[in-house]
Image (spheres, rainbow, N blue to C red):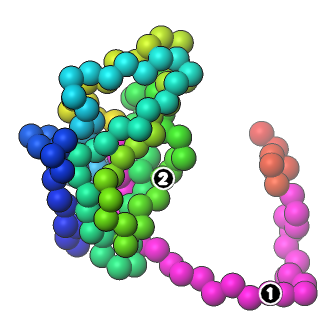
Amino acid sequence: MIVAIRILPEGEGLPMPTYMTEHAAGADLYAAVEGELVIAPGERALVSAGFSMALPPGYEAQIRPRSGLALRHGVTLLNSPGTIDADYRGTVAVILANLGGEPFVLHRGDRVAQMVVAPVAHARFEAAAELPASARAGGGFGSTGR
């Protein structure tokens, strides 16, 4: 599958999304910031990945946090996973949140998120007076135990 990528001015010189290993599900996205950006504890920032794209019809891009940023710095993504629809042509950007106790310094070109391209199924929704029974029924929010 080919995904057309258009490099935006702020993304000049940065790598395109990159799979870091042969079997990686997600391609890393890079921070298209000028110099550095400091995100204080409890704060969030919208960070451009420096490109826009055209996904094939029937696909989405899921934007997910990087585990190393979460573990080492308490930095994650809000609205995660984020969804980029096949008809979106705007800037790909991530909402970074610093849940850690120290300011987080983001530099140009740092890897900030990963993008998974996945197929999408469209459902047809129908009203029903009754639903089929199941063993779980309405149990949720931890009802299956720890």
Neighbourhood count class around disc 1 (C-alpha, 10 Å): few under 14, some 14–19, many 20 upward: few
Which picture quadrant has residue 52? Answer: bottom left
Q: Residue at 23%, 46% (x, y): give it.
A: 50
Q: Does residue 127 show up magenta in the picture? A: yes
> Residue 21: x, y in percent?
22, 46
Marked residue nearer the N-terminal end (2 or 1): 2
Front position in the image: 90 or 131: 90
Quadrant holding the N terminus: bottom left
Q: Secondary structure at mark 1?
A: loop
Front position in the image: 142 or 31: 31
**Does residue 141 appear anywhere in the picture?**
yes
Q: Decide: is 88 above or below 50.
A: below
Is 142 on the left or on the right of 2, as rendered?
A: right
**Does residue 71 appear anywhere in the picture?**
no
Q: Main secondary structure of the magenta part?
A: loop
Q: Does residue 32 show up magenta in the picture? A: no
For the record, the magenta segment spans 113-139
Q: Decide: is 7 above or below 48.
A: below
Q: Which mark is residue 127?
A: 1
Q: Callout 2, which amino acid?
A: Gly
Q: Secondary structure at mark 2?
A: strand
> Residue 139: x, y in percent?
86, 58
Residue holding disc 2: 82
Q: Residue furthest top?
A: 102
Q: Residue at 11%, 43% (x, y): give it.
A: 12
Q: Residue at 17%, 59% (x, y): give it.
A: 6
